Image (cartoon, coloured by chain):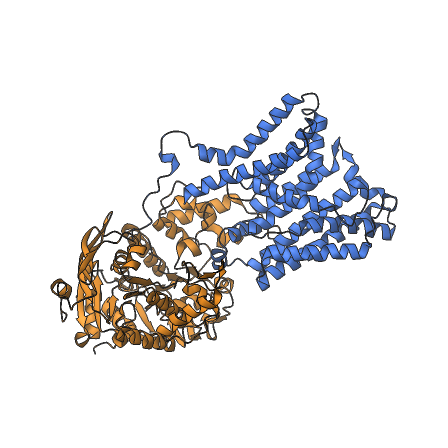
Chain colours: A blue, B orange
Amino acid sequence: MSTTDTAKGTAVDRQGFDWITFLSRWGTLISLGLLIVLFSIGRPEVFMTLRNMLNILNQVSILGMIAFGLTICLVVGLFDLSIGAMATFGGYFAARFLAELGAESGIVVALVILAVLALSAVIGMLNGALISYLGISAIVETLAMSFVATGVILGVSGGRTVYSTDIPEAFTIIGQGKIAGIPNPILILLLLGLALWVFLEHTQTGRNMYALGGNREASRLSGISFARHALIAMAISASCAALGGLVAGANLGAGRPQGVGDVYLLNAFVAVFIGASTLKPGKFHIIGTAVGVLLIGVINNGLSVMGVATFWQYIVQGGILILALISASLNTVRRV
Amino acid sequence: MTSTDHPAATGASDPSGEVLTIRGLTKQFPGTLALDAVSFGVRPGEIHALLGENGAGKSTLIKCVCGAYAPTGGEILIDGRPVTMTSPADAAAAGIAVVHQHMNLVPTLSVAENLHLGERLPRRAGLLHWRKVHRRAREVLDRVALDVPTTAIVGDLRPEQHAMISIARAVSADARIVILDEPTNALLPHEVERLFEQMRALATRGHSFLHISHRLSEVFEIADRATVLRDGRHAGTFERADMTHSGIVEAIVGRGGSLAERRGTSHARTGTLMKVRDLSGQRARGISFDLAPGEIVGLAGLPGSGADETMNLLFGRNRPTGGGIEVEGRPVPLRDPADAIAAGIANVPKNRLAEAIFHADSVRANVTLPSLANYLREPVLRLIHRGREDAAAEEVTAKMRVRMAGIGASIDSLSGGNQQKVVLGRWLTTGARIFLLNSPTAAVDVGAKKEIYDLIDELAREGKGIVFASTELEEYALVCDRVFVFAAGRVVGELTGDQVTEPNIMTLAAGGALAA
């Protein structure tokens, strides 16, 4: 009966400092900072060195590429569970094509890489088409697609790895080389992050994606096509995952038909969800995802540098995700 | 007034009298008196209609009777004995059951499971005794003479069967008074007919119904008596013999209609902006009209009459099954809202929070979303020129007189009225020439309502064509030059100029005819 127009008692009206808002915005960054301080005090001679910092970034660069792609489709409100399989797909087929072609020149390598990324984008668009035109749940559809992709890789490879002897150096350098002392994977990650940040925050397509994720019906009434943006988002997610797997393959100097992407699937989701409770609570965004990825890198590296048993990495990582989700939900619960 | 004004007040102590008596019922909310000393009664085996406009107090009354609200005054008597109900469970124990518009059924479960919802199912040796569950369900269905298998999945059944299952559930809980909250809104005429047959059969066996409906024709068909509420007060209880269209409409809208001022001069110009020809959809058929530049046309009707459906068809939300529209002589496909927008049609949907607002986003993003293409640096990457976007957002919010901390403020920090101005304003920069406004003043305070009326008038003065719909019938007189009244999916009347009054609209919408 009563109208909803009455002034809402926001926290700002109240006296004192708004801890909940503060923590939900800055909580993950504060824990990142605290962990860095903790590990630096624990093993100052090992942890807080330029070498180790680059090491951490290098270790998380592949996870970062995959998580950035996942961020895009979560912005639209779609879960992509095929990113693990797509990473394996990208790594294996790039190596396999290069081995088959016996390519040596940089241009051929570049063309093969582009072809693999384009093929992945097509698979992603197929995901988007099935989800939007047929109204299939994204979780189930991408799960099914990940089985198909895994099967195709196993069938084509016969389970055999493509070894480094068959892979041109122009490819492995992508994963192993450095420019100005910075490993190439880190540079690729930074470029990808910048591009996707601009895409999400400063283009119409990105803005439409946020609108669709926020209120799909209102978006439709504003003339925004869900199908079109679902296709784009799933294509980006699949290509980013393939790029991550490809860089992993180049780093390893081998095209493995299994076990490449699986480790990244869950970590990517953890990173993106930690990111969604950073700075802009409740919103998926690239900077947040970067923080989530760094947090995972620092935890894994720091705990192993401290000599802590591996199982602690899982517990700390899971615990921080739960805390991040709690702080984000505190903020939304209060707003309602 | 042709009614017996307060039958309950005198009849309550009569032992042969009413099964449910409401005496002086009052409900005060902060700032509003939702119910003001309402008295009436329901007799055993009676189908009693409860009528009134939106906000007349019907929902509040039902919530008091079923224990969801505590009344601030008056009393409720069952069989002449006062009862105090503090929860829906109390109401159920007193023999009152409510069947809501949305039926409270689980569509994926079977009929038998739905009939046992919330109860402990019979068991044998620790396991569910399914045969007994179905046997009990069969008995319940037989009592209301509903011939559906107990194993049928509720979602597969027809809407009137849903209503009957809900009623069966109520009756199985020994409810003597069944309150039906607009059960016919989702039903087609022949479905309503079947529901009514079964209600009559139950009434002859002593069950009483309090039937809330917007559709007067149905009330005439089914009700033994009718009670009308207006502005929280009892506006009359009519015996069957005294029920006339004009009498009930007058009770609903008040003598002489609303106090609202009739809209002043029309800004309609010559020419045709939009031509609607034979437009048809699921719940509207053969809709044709022309809209002139600067004209404000209203589409009025009771829920389910086709007025809302026509608004949705015009914007491409629902696909037309026939007919079409032309804007400035060019045919417009209506496959999707994007088609309508491309043709220069704007839309303010009925449910602001669910269909128009992008929560947790800034005012700026909420304003510029449909017109972002105008502020791009280049067409390939579609990079947004932030300065141009800000300028547009500032201009629109200034023109719409949106009160806010700034264009960067969260949309959720604005009042309902200011949010609505943002929703309306977002179309000013798309070049829209036709505005479809569905209940633009819903959940908006009185001051903001006036502002929104003024903004609509301003749009008309600029030569925009406006199609208007509202759940509050008195608004049509305030806003529109011309009104089409809908009933049962068709246009049943056109009102122009001084004819546009609340009683006239109500009479036509309820299936009556205007006095010549």
Quick one: B130 or B192, which is closer to the camera? B130
Q: Position of residue A100 (x, y in %)?
A: 86, 53
Q: Position of residue A182 (x, y in %)?
A: 73, 32
Apparent side of residue A24 relative to residue A59 in the rendered image (left or right): left
Q: Is residue B427 above or below residue A279?
A: below
| Looking at the image, residue B403 lies above or below residue B180 | above
Q: Position of residue B272 (x, y in %)?
A: 40, 70
Q: Quadrant of the N terminus of chain B?
A: bottom left
Residue drawn at point x = 59 percent, y = 64 percent:
A134
Q: Residue at x 33, y 48 (%)?
A: A5
| Residue B211 visible in the picture | yes
Q: Which residue occupies the extreme front position in the image? A: B125
In the shown orientation, is residue B351 left or right of residue B15?
right
Give left or right: position of B434 versus A125: left
Q: Is residue B219 above or below residue A204?
A: below
State the residue in front, A209 or A244.
A244
- Quadrant of the snapshot with the C terminus of chain B: bottom left
Q: Can the viewer see residue B374 in this picture?
A: no
Frontmost residue, B301 versus A313 = A313
Task: Residue B475: name its quadrant.
Answer: bottom left
Residue B327, position as x, y percentages in the image: 45, 69
Task: Decide which of B369, B356 is in the foreground and name it.
Answer: B356
